[in-house]
Image: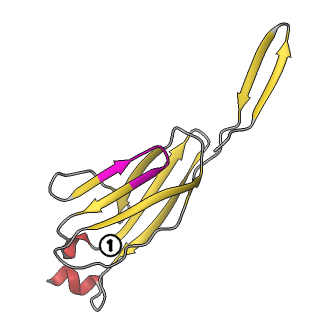
């Protein structure tokens, strides 16, 4: 993504101002969800000036990686969330937050399985 550059020459000094663009997240959804399997979802940007800082939340609380359950892989404009060995306690609303100096954006998607709702899952 090309940033707009503006230059001024004032008393022999060149000043370059770079316009910083806030991030905008592309919609994402969880697909093919099965108990015991793993699920991977990608949070990508349609725009946003680097550097971008990504965070993930579950039901409004910040997620932390764990070797046996949660994994994040983040690049300049993409972050992936991998949840291993899906069980009932993993289902809920997952939010990706992208932030830079110009602002932030977030997008949430619900992780559910077909045929069972969240109340049924928490009882199993």
- What residue sits 30% from the left and 55% below the top? 63
* Residue 22, magenta (yes or no): no
Determine whether 98 is above or below 83 in the image.
above
Furthest-bottom residue in this view: 115
Quadrant of residue 123 within the rendered picture: bottom left
Q: Which residue is mark 1?
A: 92
Q: Residues within 10 Å of mark 1 (few under 14, many from 20)?
A: some
Residue 62 in percent (x, y) is at 34, 54
* Residue 73, magenta (yes or no): yes
In terms of depth relative to the viewer, which is nearer, 105 or 1? 1
- What residue sits 28% from the left and 74% below the top? 91
Determine whether 75 is above or below 85 in the image.
above
Residue 86 in percent (x, y) is at 20, 71
Left or right: 6 in relation to 68: right
Image quarter hosting the N terminus: top right
Residue 8 in percent (x, y) is at 83, 21
- What residue sits 28% from the left and 82% below the top? 118
Quadrant of residue 109 within the rendered picture: bottom left
Determine whether 85 is above or below 67 in the image.
below
Determine whether 19 is above or below 117 in the image.
above
Query: Which is the main secondary structure of the residues drawn in magenta?
Result: strand
Left or right: 5 in relation to 45: right
How is colour applied across the structure in the image? Answer: secondary structure
- What residue sits 49% from the left and 50% below the top? 98
Furthest-top residue in this view: 11
Left or right: 18 in relation to 104: right
Image label count = 1
Residue 124 in percent (x, y) is at 14, 83
Furthest-front residue in this view: 2
Q: At numbered mark 1, what does the secondary structure look like: helix, strand or loop?
A: strand
Question: Which residues lie in the magenta part?
Answer: 72-79
């Amino acid at each position: 993504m090309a940033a707009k550059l503006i230059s001024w020459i004032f008393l022999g000094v060149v000043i370059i101002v770079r316009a910083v663009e806030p991030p905008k997240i592309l919609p994402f959804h969880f697909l093919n969800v099965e108990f015991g399997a793993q699920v991977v979802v990608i949070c990508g940007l349609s725009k946003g000036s680097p550097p971008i800082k990504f965070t993930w939340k579950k039901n409004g609380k910040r997620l932390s990686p764990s070797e046996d359950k949660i994994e994040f892989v983040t690049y300049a404009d993409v972050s992936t969330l991998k949840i291993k060995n899906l069980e009932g306690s993993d289902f809920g609303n997952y939010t990706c937050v992208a932030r830079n100096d110009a602002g932030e954006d977030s997008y949430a998607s619900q992780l559910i399985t077909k045929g069972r709702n969240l109340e049924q899952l928490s009882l199993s």
